[in-house]
Image: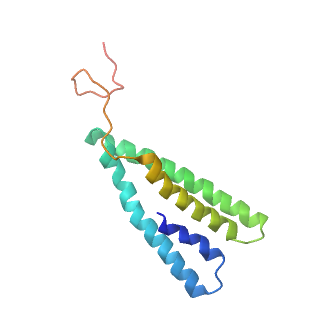
Amino acid sequence: MLLSSVITLTGVVQDVYVMLALFAIAYGSLAAAAASIWSLPADVAPTPRHVASLAGIQNFASNLAGIALTTFTGVMLQLTRGSFTIPLVVAGGFCVLGAVSYLVIVGRVEPLRAPETSGVDEPAYASRP
């Protein structure tokens, strides 16, 4: 995740080949990080039945971030008359923030505890007589 922050440099380099190499490094390292990130729901789910729900919540949050950042990019392009420098610097900053958050916030990865049940295998939303 930290290596993907080299995307920041793509906004300031003049050589197209260097820019393409930096983009390749950034997106390659994001793809490597994504494999670990997408395995987290299976690692932290209290039961196998919860994996899909956790992955859906994770995907929803990721898509919200994607919507916000693409909107931000469009606004910045309008304000700066076509410069991608600010959006690329912000993207690199979020890559650093993501790496730091996994080091500081996430902590030890272990299964969450499932809520206590009555021993009956029924959904939590099911009505009881």
Q: Is residue 13 above or below residue 47?
A: below
Number of numbered callouts drawn: 0
**Image coords of residue 6 (percent x, y):** 54, 72
Residue at the (56%, 84%) spot, across then down:
18
What residue is at 41 percent from the left and 61 percent from the top?
A: 34
Rendering coords of residue 29 (x, y %): 44, 69
Residue 53: which quarter of the image? top left
Quadrant in which residue 116 is drawn: top left
Left or right: 124 in relation to 93: left
Image coordinates of residue 70 in percent, x first then y, are 62, 60
Q: Is residue 72 above or below residue 51?
A: below
**Residue reaching furthest to the top:** 129
User: Which of the two residues, 23 or 82, is positioned nearer the viewer here?
Assistant: 23
Q: Nearer the viewer, residue 11 or 61?
A: 11
At x 30% / y 12%, what residue is drawn? 129
Which residue does the image show at 46% across and 66% down from the upper left?
30
In the displayed orientation, state which residue is furthest to the front: 104
Q: What colour scheme does the image use?
A: rainbow
Place residue 71 in its image quadrant.
bottom right
- Residue 50 point in image, percent of width and height: 32, 40
Q: Can you say whether 42 is above or below 21 in the image? A: above
